[in-house]
Amino acid sequence: MAISKIENKTAVKIALLEFLRSKYILYAISLILFIIFWDISAKMNGRFLPRPWAVLMELINGINEPIAGKILIVHLWYSLKRVFIAYAIAIAIGIPIGLLMGYSKLINAWIKPIFDLFKPMPPIAWISLAILWFGIGETSKVFIIVLGAIVPVILNSMNGIRLIDPSLYHAIRMLGGNSRQEILEVTLPASLPAIFAGLQISLSMAWTTVVAAELMGAREGMGFIIIRGMSVSNPAMIVGGMLVIAVTAWLLSVLMTLLERRICPWKTELEH
Amino acid sequence: MGKKSTNTLVLRIIPYVSILSCLIIWQLIVVLNIVPNTLLASPLQVIKLFIYKLNHTQPDGGLILVHAFVSLKEALIGYVLALLIGIPLGLAMGWFKPIDGLIRPLFEILRPIPPVAWIPLTIFWFGIGLSGKVFIIFLAGLVPVVINSYTGVRMTNPVYIRMARTYGATKWRIFIDVCVPSALPMVFGGLQVALSVSWMTLVAAELIAADSGLGFFITMGQRLLMPDMIILGILMIGLTGVVIGIIVDKVEKRLVAGMWR
Amino acid sequence: MENRTRALKNFKVQCVGISKSFGEGNEKKLILDDINFGVGDEFVVVLGPGQSGKTTLLNLIAGLERPSTGQVFVDGEEVTGPGPDRGLVFQKYTLFPWKTVMGNVEMGLKLSGMSKKERREMASYYIDLVGLKGFENSYPHELSGGMKQRVSIARAYVNKPKVMLLDEPFGQLDAQTRYLMENEIIRIWQAEKRTIIFVTNNIEEAIFLGDRILSLDGKFPGRLKTIYDVDLDRPRDRADTSFLKIRQRITEETMLIL
Ligand SMILES: Nc1ncnc2c1ncn2[C@@H]1O[C@H](COP(=O)(O)OP(=O)(O)OP(=O)(O)O)[C@@H](O)[C@H]1O
Ligand SMILES: [Mg+2]
C-alpha cells in the first residue's frame, strides 16, 4: 500500500516534470510572464514605458493615421527602398571586386590593404562626411548603406573563390575544360553558396544601417519614426516602430533563406 | 597563376605601394582643389589637426584622446557586462531545457531588433549620459555572445556526454566538466563579433546624442563644417576599434592558455 | 633509355624512366623513382601500401602533375597536361555538388560543345550502364558513397577516353558495397572495354580485378617491384584455390617490403 502511494506520487511528479519540460508550454509561460511583467512595469511607470495594449493601438492607428504626413506603411516603404537601392549597388560593385580579389593575387595585393584600412571604421561613422558631401537627402543615406552592405559581400565573394576545393578544378580539366569553362563551370557555381551567405549578412547589415542613417536626419522612414517618438515623448510610438523594424528584419532574413534554397539547392550538403 | 619567384616579392611590395599611392592621390585631390577644401581635408591637414588636438580642447571642448577614452570606457563597461551576463546565460540555455524554454522566446524577440533601433528608447529612458550608452552596448553585445555560447554547448560531442553519464556524473557536473570546456572555443569565437557590433552601435549612439566621445567629435565637425575634424574622428574610431580588438584578443589568448595548462 | 622506349613501344600507355620528387632543397622528398611500364588494352591494377605514391603516379599519367624526370605517353603522344583522352576517377568524391547526376555525367560532352539533345542521350546511356537509371535528377549529396563513385565512373566513361584511371575508387566504401562495386566495374568494363589503370591498396581487390598487377614498393621512394599476371577466368571467385594461391604469393612477397 505504502509503496503504491509512493509510486503514485512519483508518477504525478514525473508527469508534472514532463509537462514542464515540453518546450511549447515553457514558451507560452515565458511569453505570458513577459507580457504581464511588461504591463505591470508600464502601469507603474507609464511615462517611460507604454503598455502592450498602447503599442498595439499605436500600430493600428498608424495604418491610416499619418505621422509627419505619411502613414506607417509609407515610412516602411521609404526605408526598404533605400535598402534595396543601396543593396543593389553594393552587390553590383562588391561581387566583382570580391571575385577578382579571390581570383587574382595581384589584384588582391592592390585592394586588400585599402579594404583592411576601411573595415574597422563602422559605416555609420561616415554619415557626417556623407551629409557634408551630399546634403541630408537620399544620396547620403544610400551612400552609407552601401558602405555597410558592401563589406560582407566582398569578403564572402573573395573567400568563396579562395576556398574552392582544388580537385574540382582538376576534375574539370580532366574532362577537357579550358580556362574560360573552368571559370564558368567551377569557379562561379562553387563560390555561389559563400557569396549568398555574404548577401544574407549584407542585407541585415543594410537594414541596420538604414535605421541608423534615418535616426541621424530624415523626414521619413522607420528610423525617423522611432526618433520622432523620442522627441515627442511618445514611448508607444518608439516601441511600435521597433517592433515593425524587428519584424521586417526577420522577414528579410526568411526571404533570403527561401531564396537560397531556390538558388543553391545543393547547399544542404555543405551544412551537413 | 603565374611565375612564382618573381611574383612573391612583387606581391609583398604592392600593398605598401597601394596605400601610399592612395594617400598621395588623396593629398593631390585636395591640393589641386579637385574637391574643395570645405568638403574634404587632406591627409596632412588631418595629421596637423590630430597633433593640435593632443593638447587643445578647442573647438569642441575636449582633447582628442579624452574623447577616445570616453568612448573606450563606455564600450568596455557595456561589453564586459554583456559577457558577464551573456556567457553564463547562453551556456545555461544550451544545457538546461527549462532555462532554454523560458528564455528563448524573449531572446527570439530581442534578436531581430537591430541594436541601433534601441537608441531612441535608451535616450528616452536614460538621457545622453554614460548609463544609456552602457545599456545600449550591453544589448548590442548580448545577442552574439548568447548565440555563440548556446551553440557551443549544443555542439558538444555527444560521445563525451554519454561517456560522462556512464561514469555516473550528475547533470550539473557534466555541464561544468564537459559542456563548458568544449563550448569555450565557440564562446571566444563570438567575442570579436560582439565587440564590433557593440562598437558600431556606440558610435551611432554618440553621433545621435552625446556631449563627449568620438561620435560627438564627428558631430561637432559636421556642425562646424570642418571636414578635417570629421575625418580625424572617423580615423580615430577605426583606430580605437582596432585597439580594443587587440586587447580582447590578448585577454582571450591569456585565458585560453591559462585554461589548457 | 632508348631500349626502354623501344620495349614499351607497342603499349597504349607508356611510363618511361619516371621519377617524381616534391619540395626544394632540404625538404626535397623523392616519392617515385625509376618507374617503367606499359599498359595495353587490358585491366591493370597498381597495388601498393598507403603513401607509396599511387596517387602521384596516376596524377602523372593524368597530367595533373609533371614528372621530375622521364615521360608519359598515351597512344604515342607525350602527356603534358590534363585532358579528356584520359578519364580520372578520384580517390575522394569530386562530383560537382551543384550539378545533378545528369549534369555531372554530361559535363565532359558539354565542355566539348556537343548539343544538349545529343549529350543527354549519351549521358543517359552511361547512367544506365552504371546502374543509376532513375537518379538522373538527384544531387550528389543525396547519393550514397557507392552511387557517387558510379557517377564518377560514368562521368569519365562518357568521354570515351583512351585510358581510364581509377584511384582507389572504392576505398571509402563499406566492405559489402565494395564487393558489389568490384563486380560492377568488371561488368561495366566488359560491356564497354577500355584500357584501365586501377589503383588499390587491397590485394584481394587487385587479384579480383586485374589482368596484371603492378606492385609498388612501399618505402620512399616508391619503385615498381613485381609484375604479376593473373590468368584467372572471369567472373573470378574470391574463394577459389587458384585465387587464394596467387593471393598467398602476393601477400608473402609484399610483406617482405613492409
Ligand atoms: N603535392 C605534393 N607536395 C608534397 N608532397 C606530396 C604531394 N603529393 C603527394 N605528396 C607526398 O607523396 C607521398 C605519396 O603520396 P600519394 O598520395 O601519392 O600516396 P598514395 O599511395 O596515393 O597514398 P594513399 O594510399 O594514402 O592514397 C606522401 O607522403 C605525400 O605526402
Ligand atoms: Mg592515394
Image (cartoon, rainbow, N blue to C red):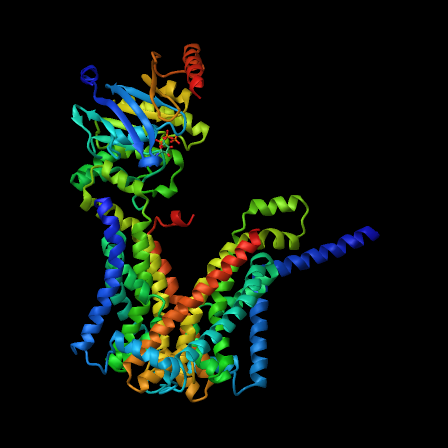
Would residue C178 be visible to someone looking at this image? yes
Please name the residue shown 23% across and 80% down the image: B39
- Tell me residue A121's x, y (percent): 35, 70
Question: Quadrant of the rendered structure where residue C255 is?
Answer: top left
- Tell me residue A16's x, y (percent): 68, 59
* In this picture, residue A44 sits left or right of residue C154: right
Q: Is residue C36 above or below residue B52?
A: above
Q: Quick check: which quadrant has ligand 1? A: top left
Question: Quadrant of the rendered structure where residue C202 is?
Answer: top left
Determine the residue located farthest toward the bottom in the rendered image: A232
Q: Is residue B253 above or below residue C185?
A: below
Which of C23 and A48 lies nearest the eye of the viewer? C23
Please name the residue shown 35% across and 80% down the image: B218
- Tell me residue C183's x, y (percent): 37, 23
Would residue B207 be visible to someone looking at this image? no
Which of A25 and B98 lies nearest the eye of the viewer? B98
How many numbered callouts? 0
- Tell me residue A138's x, y (percent): 26, 78
Question: Quadrant of the rendered structure where residue B28 is?
Answer: bottom left
Q: Is residue C71 above or below residue A16?
A: above
Q: Is residue C99 above or below residue C58?
A: below
* In this picture, residue C21 sits left or right of residue B66: left
